Amino acid sequence: MAETTRATSAAAVDDLVAAVLSGSRRALARAITHVEASGSEAREIMTRLYPHTGRAHVVGVTGSPGVGKSTLVGELARAFRQKNVTVGIVAVDPTSPFSGGAILGDRIRMRELAGDPGVFVRSMATRGHLGGLAAATSDVMRVLDAAGYPLVLIETVGVGQAEVDVARLAQTTIVVEAPGLGDDIQTLKAGIMEIADIFVVNKADLPGSDAVVNALRAALALGSGKSDYVGHHFLQMWGDAPAHGSHPAQSDGTWQPPVIEASAVKRQGIMDVAAAIKQHRAHLRQSGAWARREKQRVQMDLEYWLKQLMLERLLQQVNRAELSDWVDDIVDRRAAPQDVASRLLERFRQAT
Amino acid sequence: MAETTRATSAAAVDDLVAAVLSGSRRALARAITHVEASGSEAREIMTRLYPHTGRAHVVGVTGSPGVGKSTLVGELARAFRQKNVTVGIVAVDPTSPFSGGAILGDRIRMRELAGDPGVFVRSMATRGHLGGLAAATSDVMRVLDAAGYPLVLIETVGVGQAEVDVARLAQTTIVVEAPGLGDDIQTLKAGIMEIADIFVVNKADLPGSDAVVNALRAALALGSGKSDYVGHHFLQMWGDAPAHGSHPAQSDGTWQPPVIEASAVKRQGIMDVAAAIKQHRAHLRQSGAWARREKQRVQMDLEYWLKQLMLERLLQQVNRAELSDWVDDIVDRRAAPQDVASRLLERFRQAT
């Protein structure tokens, strides 16, 4: 294992946690590195920091590659910094300049932000978070929360499951569109409309921008807008499933997702987006949706940890050679994975 | 619950499984619907079908929105149909015309395929598969495998965690690029290079295509190409972690991902892509990578089922009111999720 994940003494964890809470950037960076490595120190650090979380406003910014999400995130950070709000940025998007993945010009623009002690940028590698990117992002976001960042911007790419997962981490989700990226508005085609609290049509100075705005507004007029969607199966498991079938309850009350035109590169419309973020936060607080979403996030976290800990304990008890035989049984089609899982659990239960 | 997921008797499951194995399209569609609903019938059906799986060549096709993945998938299906190979298509991409999400022209083109009894198309909704899209896709893919489809094409969108997850389901991963979609080649920016077995530069008749091809080839010459990456954390858990740190072992031997120019709309280059798919399959078989990937897939499936069954059993034993109190403790920051998970597991252990 790398040096950053080596065993840390309890005293060192104490010191690290204290330093994070006192605002040390260096401690914050180290704590996040520990948390990402998800060893035993990570759990200890998260446990200690957890009581200090729950204050940050987490804003997810999602959209297809090329719509200018990173530039928008950068400009939003700048706008909030002008009001003396410190900003944490988490880039889950591997194509983001925040992740070091983009062209040089973008990275240079981002480096201005990096020089500001009121901005903390962290890129999440997609590797090593098997099935757990949302969980890892959740932990990093909570470390930033505990460290006192009142605003955390999470940048994710594209449409799909990963975005829906990360949207559940955010109190506010901004979906970014832009003209000229093919024939269609990507969000209209997918389920992504449902996760948007705010739409931003970026590059609004380019031709075709009006058409994108109109299409979004028409779709919003037709559709139902955002719902407090967490996943039917998930809620079922926890006994919280809505009674009326597979559609989640509409519970955000009166919020109508605004469609805002902007040009992040030209620094136009940024203040409108910042104002919408603040309005949405106020709406969440007033409607009770903030607390509801927090509870759902907590259930997700708890489910993740239950699964993780149970698997670890099981694998500690099962003989490696025996496990390998079980895997071979599945590979050779003598048994299905779910049957082997059942039988392994039977053995585990007898052993304890 | 909907009619399609109502309780099915054991005899009905017998009949359904027999009908799937005998090649009934109607039975296949019903079985997949059951599997997606993931009830008790789903497990029974998967258990019965599992011995008949393991023969299909699963090919993942991924790339950003707008590169023409769906058209390429459609043309590949047509090419293999001309050689009398039956083809299953699974669209995980919510923006795909296969998912009903795209513009009319695309959908009409796809409808030609839908009239061919040797092609079976299924779209995976992204909703309702919380944290389990890869697992649900895996099940659907295995049903098609059991039903005798020798080739299964899985279409996924964009770059990111979902793609890496689905790539692990596929024996062969095709990454599609196209000129004119912004300043950059998206795959170069992300970790996506590592999952590609075959690169296709689609819309090769458009300006800028040569630049995309050259950039990909240059990156391939620099980099290491595809590795049998499954996730370090995952392998660690199973005791199979590579000994030399966080980089997975290169184990695909001599395979050099080809970069193929194509224009799916103009039906150019399709035969080259089909040939590369067959070559890669032969390579996997000869190098032993096929068996290695199958084993990793099986470990993933087993891990998924272990976690799922353990959580279900736990939640059956825990009192709902008590669980709700635990969740409130986390919401109110009296305890961290991982601590509550630990304590719940202690109680569970004492109870059994």
Image (cartoon, coloured by chain):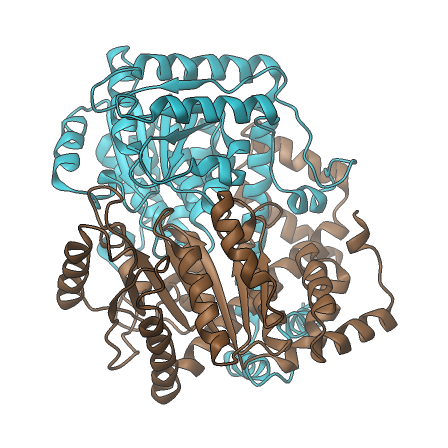
Chain colours: A brown, B cyan
Front-most of B10 and A117?
A117
Q: Where is residue B45 shown, x and y percent of the image?
A: 39, 41
Q: Nearer the viewer, residue A117 or B234?
A: A117
Horizontal side of A121 relative to B266 (left or right) equals right
Q: Quadrant of residue B149?
A: top left
Residue B81 in the image: state x and y as whole percent. Answer: 25, 16
Q: Quadrant of residue A90?
A: bottom right
Q: What percent of the width, then of the height, locates residue B62? A: 39, 35
Q: How many marks?
A: 0
Residue B142 % position (x, y): 42, 34
- Specify the farthest residue to the bottom: A286
Question: Could one spot residue B11 in this view of the protein?
Answer: yes
Q: Residue at x 18, y 31 (%)?
A: B110
Name which quarter of the figure residue A79 lies in.
bottom left
Quadrant that contains the C terminus of chain B: bottom right
Q: Pick the quarter of the image with the N terminus of chain B.
A: bottom left
Against B244, residue A131 (above or below) is below
Left or right, residue A180 beside residue B343: left
Report the residue at 50% width, 12% height from top. Answer: B282
In the picture shown, does residue A108 fall above or below A141? Answer: above
Regarding residue A238, the answer to whether it shows in the image is no
